[in-house]
Amino acid sequence: MHPFHHAAATPDKPAIIMADGSGEMSYAELEAASNRAAQFYRSQGLKRGDTIVIFLQNCLDYLPLCWGAQRAGLIFVAMSTKLSVDEAQYIVDNSGADLVIADVSLAEVAAKLKAPKGGFSLGGDIDGYEPLAPRLAEQPASRIEDESQGRDMLYSSGTTGRPKGITGPLPDGPIDEMNPLIGLTQMLFNFGPDMKYLSPAPLYHAAPLRYCMAVHRFGGTVVIMKKFDPERFLALVEEHRITHSQLVPTMFVRMLKLPEDVRSKYDVSSLKVAIHAAAPCPIEVKRRMMEWWGPVIYEYYSATEGTGFTAINPQEWMEKQGSVGKALLGEIRIIDEDGNLLPQGREGRVFFAEAGEIEYHGDPEKSASVQHPEHGATFGDIGYVDEDGYLFLTDRAAYMIITGGVNVYPQEAEDVLVMHPKVQDVAVIGVPHEEMGEEVKAVVEPRDWADAGPELEADLIAFARERLSHVKCPRSVDFEKALPRHDTGKLYKRLLKDRYWNKEGASA
């Protein structure tokens, strides 16, 4: 259960293929590169438990650097490439990172970052950084003598506040030790040595990084896109005969909105498992994807924190449409605002009991805020459990709108509006209202900016009212050329809300 085994057994097998043709790496080459990375970390005085920051775009070097840290007992922070200088420096400082490895394309931010052991650049020169490639080349390709198991420490996307480092103890076992994710991927998604996994999302996010590394533990091949493009994704499935992938619902929506002649010209019959998570998927979107791709779409519900896990296969989902499945890690508890356990069918905050605690690096107050002494930990979502034990999510607690004393969860309106043919993306939020406290507003990214205006606004409001209770529908629609959405599909709804609440002089 580690690439070094596959380097010995199948040295010439592709471990990594860059989808844009910029490079390919066999298992033998991955083994040598990750060993050189581990040797480099030791040459910098880094020891077990020390921390590094990887600040890179998707590239051929990304996973070898992570595997080098994993076998050197380091904590590796895969940092978002979308951050400002202040946000990035906050993560460098908060994580206690000793050094930063950065991409030359990120030089504008990277050059201003400070770490105790400095920075190393890939792909070109960054002011104040030392080029990494020659330092790696001078290292031996042999394994370091004191190998031990490291781990990632990933930061939340900051959709509801400051990013939080999700941490935990370093594993004590050998570097090829089985872990819970490996067991789950094998049991649920049939991971194995013959798989070809297409990764369309940034590797700094938890699911792409961890699942790509899981593929390497099984000896499969990872095909990495630098950036998601809907038609290119379909072409890659056909070209590489992809068997597995993991996507987010916004990717499904973008593929469904391709012209029919474009969608139908690519052969996607090799796909056996298309996993989705990270954000809620509208029922109609998932249904249409299964009509197109067949019963290959699997879903799980978890978080970077890793405390709690549910899953549902395509056949189950057709019987329980809208569910995210049954618990496989932890026991689901639905809790009201006073901490009382709610019965089946009643909506409340979702907790996972007996699945471990959530620990945010350097923030015991935040860690405590998501724990309940009796009911476990929560990711902050609202939902209910049906009579068969299937979990249905309503929305995130932080996104709830209270209008005239009525609780409105915006996900329902978003799921309706995103299917309108003139809508590319949508967010529904609560904005200040003098009488009602909050009013429901939709912020829409139209497919064609020329459509933005009063006519489309009226059409969208009517479209929603035909399908939902009027209290759940937007009273007004604003238009944006691009919504602030994370590459992993999560919407930075906090940024949208701030604009409207700050206009009124109130805090978001």
Image (spheres, rainbow, N blue to C red):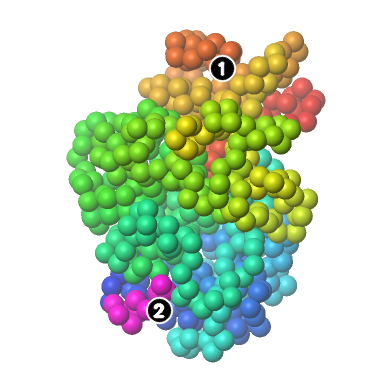
Q: Which mark is residue 4?
A: 2
* Crowd band around label 2 with a 10 angstrom C-alpha radius: few (<14), some (14–19), many (20+): many
| Nearer to me, 456 or 324 | 324
| Nearer to me, 277 or 225 | 277
Which secondary structure, mark 2? helix
- In the picture of the structure, the residue carrying the numbered disc 1 is 472
Q: Which quadrant would the N terminus be assigned to in this image?
A: bottom left
Q: Image point 70% across, 16% down: which residue?
A: 405
User: Could you say where residue 317 lies in the image, as x and y percent from the top left?
Assistant: 36, 36
What residue range appears in magenta? 1-11
User: Going by the picture, which residue comes out furthest to the right?
Assistant: 505
Q: Measured along the vertical axis of the image, is residue 313 above or below residue 466? A: below
Q: How many marks?
A: 2
* 1 or 2: tag closer to the N-terminus: 2
For the residues labelled 1 and 2, say whether their Cβ atoms are less than 8 Å apart. no
User: Could you say where residue 78 lies in the image, as x and y percent from the top left?
Assistant: 57, 61
Q: Image point 73% across, 17% down: which residue?
A: 437
The Cα atoms of the two marked residues, 1 and 2, are separated by: 54 Å
Residue 4 lies within the magenta run: yes
Q: Which mark is residue 448?
A: none
Magenta stretch, main secondary structure, is helix
| Amino acid type, callout 2 | Phe
Quarter location, residue 169: bottom right
Left or right, 456 with reference to 361 = left
| Amino acid type, callout 1 | Lys
Which secondary structure, mark 1? helix
Q: Which quadrant would the C terminus be assigned to in this image?
A: top right
User: Could you say where residue 198 lies in the image, as x and y percent from the top left?
Assistant: 35, 55
Left or right, 284 with reference to 366 = left
User: Could you say where residue 245 lies in the image, as x and y percent from the top left?
Assistant: 35, 51
